[in-house]
Image (tube, rainbow, N blue to C red):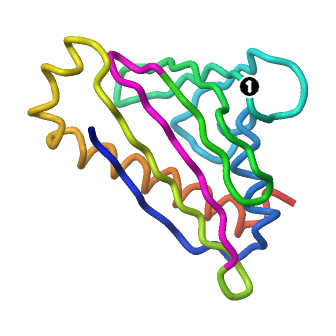
Amino acid sequence: MGSINLSISIDATPEVVFAVVSDVENSPERIDWFEKVELLTEGPVDVGTKWRETRRMNKNHSVEEWEMTAFESPSYFSAYCDSQGYDVESTRRVDPEGDGSRLTLAMTTKPRTLFGKLMTPVEWLMSGMMKSIVRKDLESTKAYIEQGSST
């Protein structure tokens, strides 16, 4: 099983940070390699909300379907995705930090299929790339919020 746990300080209240990161439908506004996000369920974002996101990964596209598995505003949410033979759980946690917030993104992957299990010995090759992607997600979110695009 692989895991990533990175965080960043953001100069905004936890309520503002959580409102932005939990607005999955508008993720392409703050993360430029997200091409589009389609909500697959109606109503406000909460446990059970499903969406499909299309990301640009180098010259390729990655399409993943996610489902919200936990949602506790303005503190955290978790989502699950079945991705290319892996179970993926992603959690975003927002904690007060001084006058601002600390946003933490934690992701765990667990191989589910034979292909995923066969890839386990080389997961370390992908971990650096995944950390870089998560770090860029956090930095893009920070820039978006601190530039006032969320208000």
- Judging from the image, what secondary structure is the residue with disc 1 in? loop
Region of the chain picked out in magenta, as a range:
82-96
Query: Could you tell me residue 5's position as x and y percent?
Result: 41, 57
Q: Residue at x 72, y 67 (%)?
A: 147
39 or 85, nearer to the observer: 85
Residue that label 1 marks: 48
Q: Main secondary structure of the magenta part?
A: strand
The furthest residue to the top: 114
Q: Quadrant of residue 36?
A: top right
- Given the current orientation, which residue lies at the most extreme left position? 121
Relative image position of residue 45 (x, y in whole percent) = 81, 34
Residue 118 drawn at (x, y percent) = 13, 19
Q: Residue at x 72, y 63 (%)?
A: 145
Asked if residue 151 lies in the magenta stretch, the reply is: no
Q: Residues within 10 Å of mark 1 (few under 14, many from 20)?
A: some
Residue at 63% of width from left, 25% of height from top? 67
Q: Which one is nearer the viewer's eye here, 82 or 35? A: 82
Nearer to me, 19 or 148: 19
- The number of numbered badges drawn on the structure is 1
Quadrant containing the C terminus is bottom right
Q: Quadrant of residue 10?
A: bottom right
* Quadrant (top left/top right/bottom left/bottom right) for the N terminus: top left
Instruction: Residue at 43%, 61% (x, y): give it.
Output: 6
Give the vertical position of 73 relative to 96 (above or below).
above
Give, as a three-letter code, the residue at label 1: Gly
Q: Residue 86 magenta-drawn?
A: yes
Q: Is residue 82 left or right of residue 36?
A: left
User: Measured from the top left, where is residue 109 in percent x and y?
Assistant: 35, 35
Please state which of residues 110 and 43 is positioned toward the viewer in this rendering.
110
Which picture quadrant has residue 94? bottom right
